[in-house]
Structure formats: structure tokens, C-alpha cells
Amino acid sequence: FKDLDILQFLGCTALSTIKVDSNNPYYSATSGVLFNKDKTTLVWYPQAKATTSYEIPSGVTKIGDYAFLYAQKLTKVTVPKTVKTIGDGAFLLCDKLETFDFLGSNGMLQRMNIGVGNDVLYCVNVYVSNAPYLEGTTSAGKPKLSWDKITGAEKYYIYRSTDGKSFDFRGEI
């Protein structure tokens, strides 16, 4: 099927993995998650997938409508800076989701097209691995970071990374 209605999977509460034949002209799967053929759109994350943390592969530019709908075990999702669009209801009913880690800059997150029905994303951690807003030093000789505020964000969590993969918690603002 070229046009797959994701909402048809809604009742599949025991579906934990998806497999796609490599000859399928429209879809592919990686680690049990459904993508379009060229892996630029995450189409569906199975509701019963056992993992609590998921890292979206780099190169994905869109999280499709209802892609993570009712992912009951998911507590953390890591989103690469390549993602530009989050579809309507992509994280709807993800009641256990606590952490949304975006590996791009605050500016990139602000420019991202986030669809309706994603209220769970108001509590996000933003990692700025290249520190594009580094400016000056404080009187103690420590780096001073500044950024544009994100609409709706109540807290910011500061992490540091030297390799873009592992992050050290530095504090809460």
C-alpha cells in the first residue's frame, strides 16, 4: 500500500515490531520501526515495543502523523537535528514520555514545524552540542551561554557534550 492509514494500527496493542520485505517499493523497517523507503520519514513506532528509550536515526527529516501514537513504554525519545517536521498527533497518548531530546540548536527547534496534538512536547531537553551561542566569560572565567527562549518552555536543562553522543548534566535554569 502506498498510502498507509496509520490509525488502522491503533487496536494492535500487542504489535511490538514491524518487518518489511526489502523489495517493498514504499516502506522499510529498522529495529522494528516503520519508515518510508528512503528512511526520511518515521511512519510508525509499534505501540507494544519493549524499549523505553528510542533514538531516531540521523537522516530522518519528518516524524509522521501519529507515528508514536499510544507508545505506552516509551519514556525517552532522542531526535536528530535533521528532523524538520513533527506530524499531527505524533506523540499523542504517549503518557509515559518524560524526555524529548533534540540534538540540534534552540533556533532549529523553534523553526521546526510541530503539528497539533503534541502537547507532551512542552517539557523538552535541548542539547546544543556545538554551542553556537557561546559568548564572553563570566568573572569566574567560565563560559557564558545565551539563547532565544522557547515559547512554552518553563525550564531549561543544560548538558555538555564533547563528542555529540554522550552528555553530562550541568544544571537547570
Image (tube, rainbow, N blue to C red):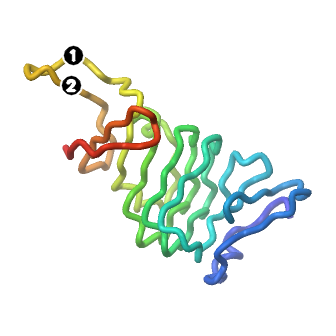
- Crowding at dot 2, Cα within 10 Å, few <14 / some 14-19 / many 20+, comes out as few
**As drawn, 148 above or below 88:** above
Mark 1 secondary-structure assignment? strand
Residue on which the image places disc 2:
144
- Crowding at dot 1, Cα within 10 Å, few <14 / some 14-19 / many 20+, comes out as few
| Marks 1 and 2 in Cβ contact (< 8 Å) | yes
Q: Quadrant of the N terminus?
A: bottom right
Residue on which the image places disc 1:
136
Mark 2 secondary-structure assignment? strand
Residue 162 lies in what quarter of the image? top left
Residue under the point 24% across and 49% down: 155
Q: Nearer the viewer, residue 68 or 15?
A: 15
For badge 1, the amino acid type reads Gly
Q: Is residue 92 left or right of residue 148?
A: right
**As drawn, 121 above or below 9:** above
Q: Is residue 107 left or right of residue 153?
A: right
Q: Nearer the viewer, residue 8 or 38?
A: 38
Q: Is residue 31 left or right of residue 91?
A: right
Q: Position of residue 171 (x, y in %)?
A: 21, 44
Q: Quadrant of the C terminus?
A: top left
Q: How far separated are the C-alphas under marks 1 and 2?
A: 6 Å
Q: Position of residue 2 (x, y in %)?
A: 85, 59
Residue under the point 36% across and 51% down: 124
Task: In the rendered structure, find residue 60 and report the number of the disc placed on it.
Answer: none
Mark 1 or 2, nearer chain start = 1
**Number of labelled discs?**
2
For badge 2, the amino acid type reads Lys
Q: Is residue 146 left or right of residue 121?
A: left
Residue under the point 64% across and 78% down: 10
Q: Position of residue 143 (x, y in %)?
A: 22, 24
